[in-house]
Image (cartoon, rainbow, N blue to C red):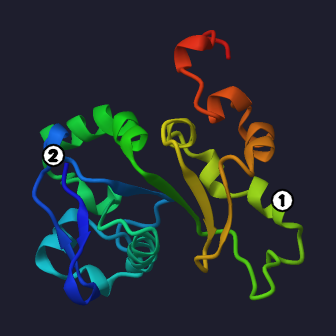
């Protein structure tokens, strides 16, 4: 499992694969993908062209937030998986839940939700809850595991302002997704029926 590593001077480096027992503490990034031409891919990190794409803004946010949380390593699906290697891609898909589960923090970056400087959500004067509920992030297939696997999930607006975490937003998350509050709180999945 390769990570992005913050190195001296604020630059980023793609690490070699870490093996299970050697995996350092890390943050993991949850977001909605843009067009392939915008997102930072594994090869962009390898050849140093990552800053040329608009998706670098998300990587930069994650780097800054990891630094604030004193985490040197973080993982972003768009650029930490070599999607041209079918074996690596398959292993990543099969390991994703475990990777989210072992992360120290999960940063959910909601590109379609913003806040102004007065900490009011700013989206056509709608209340923040309305904007939050309509976020494209909730329509993705990966949202379920990204909400229940990590112990700590924090939500950020497109301008990088934090507006809550899994605990403070658990009622809204339940209402939006139908995921039972005990599941959001970390109750073992074996305690739930198939229908739950």
Q: Is residue 126 above or below residue 173?
A: below
Q: Quadrant of residue 108?
A: bottom right
Residue 76's spot in the image, x, y percent?
35, 59
Question: Residue 177 location, x and y as percent?
Answer: 71, 38
Instruction: Inspect this view and state whether residue 63 appears.
Output: yes
Dot 1: what SS? Answer: helix
Q: Nearer the viewer, residue 142 or 3?
A: 3
The circle on residue 129 is: 1
Q: Earlier in the sequence, mark 1 or mark 2?
A: 2
Compared to residue 69, the image places residue 132 above or below, namely above
The local secondary structure at tag 2 comes to: helix
Which residue lies at the image location 15% right of the left edge and 46% below the top edge?
Answer: 22
Task: Tell me if mark 1 has few (under 14), some (14-19) or many (20+) residues whose alpha carbon lies within 10 angstroms of its own.
Answer: few
Mark 1 or mark 2, which is nearer to you?
Answer: 2
Name the side, left or right, on which 7 lies relative to 136: left
> Circle 2 is placed at which residue position?
22
* Residue 5 spot, x, y in % from top left: 24, 69
Return the x and y of residue 24 as percentages of the image width and height: 24, 53
141, 180: nearer the viewer: 180
Find the residue positioned furthest to the top: 193
Q: Residue at x 13, y 38 (%)?
A: 87
Q: Which of the 4 image quadrants contains residue 54? A: bottom left
Residue 148: mark in rendering: none
């Amino acid at each position: 499992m390769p990570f992005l590593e913050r190195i001296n001077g604020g630059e980023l480096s793609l690490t070699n694969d870490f093996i299970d027992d050697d995996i350092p503490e890390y943050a993991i990034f949850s977001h909605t993908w843009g067009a392939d031409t915008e997102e930072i891919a594994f090869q962009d990190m390898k050849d140093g062209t990552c800053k040329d794409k608009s998706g670098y803004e998300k990587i930069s946010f994650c780097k800054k937030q990891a630094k604030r949380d004193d985490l040197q390593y973080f993982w972003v699906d768009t650029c930490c998986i070599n999607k041209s290697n079918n074996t690596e891609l398959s292993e990543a898909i099969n390991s994703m839940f475990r990777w989210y589960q072992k992360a120290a923090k999960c940063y959910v970056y909601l590109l379609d939700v913003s806040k102004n400087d007065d900490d009011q959500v700013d989206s056509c004067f709608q209340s923040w809850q309305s904007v939050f509920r309509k976020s494209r992030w909730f329509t993705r297939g990966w949202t379920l595991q990204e909400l229940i696997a990590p112990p700590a999930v924090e939500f950020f607006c497109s301008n990088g302002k934090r507006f809550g975490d899994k605990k403070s937003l658990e009622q809204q998350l339940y209402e939006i997704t139908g995921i039972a509050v005990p599941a959001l709180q970390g109750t073992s999945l074996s305690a739930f029926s198939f229908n739950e």
